[in-house]
Amino acid sequence: FRRGGLHAIVGQPGSGKTSFLLAVLLRHALNPESGPVIFASYELPPMDLFGRIAALALDGAAWNEVCDGNQMEQAASVQAWLDTLPMHFIHSRAPQGQINGKPKTRVDELVEAVNEFTSRNSGKQPILGIDYMQTLISYSDDPRLEMERLLASLQKSCAEEGLTIIALTAAARGSIGK
């Protein structure tokens, strides 16, 4: 992925976009030369998100088994390992996913949080993963205009902040290839 660029991963629901993005971000976080990772999730509950990360770390354990508590010992070791990585998670349903008590769902607020994280940490610009782009808002009632504004806002953040963004977006069934 190009530094300072906006990258979209598009696929049908259930096609593995979130797991793929998590694998990319984990690989980035494991490289000490790469810098930190921020993953903003507005789609999955925190436990489901952790279960997917644990499944990646446990070489193929079913993420639902981790979430259901069937692999608690392994999950605890994954959490301890994860705490050592330069990764930060923002979740709209979790307290750290809020600014002044409001969910971080606007692009400008999300970029502000990324900048705060960067200044508090290594100073290296992180890679930002967003799960799902459609859950960010730019305050428009027209879905097409909404997406255009979101893309313009994300591209502006990439250009002005030097931020690398990898965003997931869902394609309606039957729309891929058209």
Image (cartoon, rainbow, N blue to C red):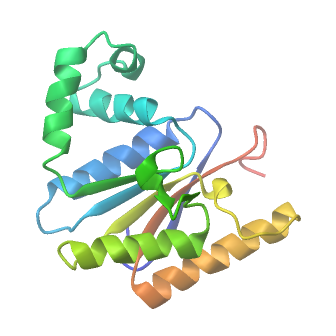
> Where is 53 relative to 126, above or below?
above
Q: Where is residue 136 in the image (x, y as percent from the top left)?
A: 64, 60
Q: Give the left or right position of residue 99, taking residue 80 as reference.
A: right
Q: Where is residue 10 in the image (x, y as percent from the top left)?
A: 60, 51
Camera-side residue of 61 and 42: 42
Taking the spot 83% from the left edge, 61% from the top edge, the residue there is 143
> Where is 119 relative to 74, above or below?
below
Taking the spot 23% from the left edge, 24% from the top edge, the residue there is 75
Camera-side residue of 98 and 59: 98
> Where is 163 relative to 51, above or below?
below
- Specify the quadrant that holds the N terminus: bottom left
> Where is 161 relative to 81, above or below?
below
Residue 41 visible, this angle: yes
Q: Position of residue 4 (x, y in %)?
A: 40, 80
Report the residue that reaches farthest toward the bottom. Answer: 160
Q: Give the left or right position of residue 27, taking residue 105 as reference.
A: left
Please count the marks in the image: 0
Camera-side residue of 98 and 134: 98
Taking the spot 27% from the left edge, 49% from the top edge, the residue there is 26
Specify the quadrant of the image occupied by residue 138.
bottom right
Taking the spot 35% from the left edge, 75% from the top edge, the residue there is 116
Q: Where is residue 52 in the image (x, y as percent from the top left)?
A: 38, 32
Residue 2 visible, this angle: no
Report the residue that reaches farthest toward the top. Answer: 70
Q: Give the left or right position of residue 103, taking residue 67 as reference.
A: right
Specify the quadrant of the image occupied by residue 8.
bottom right
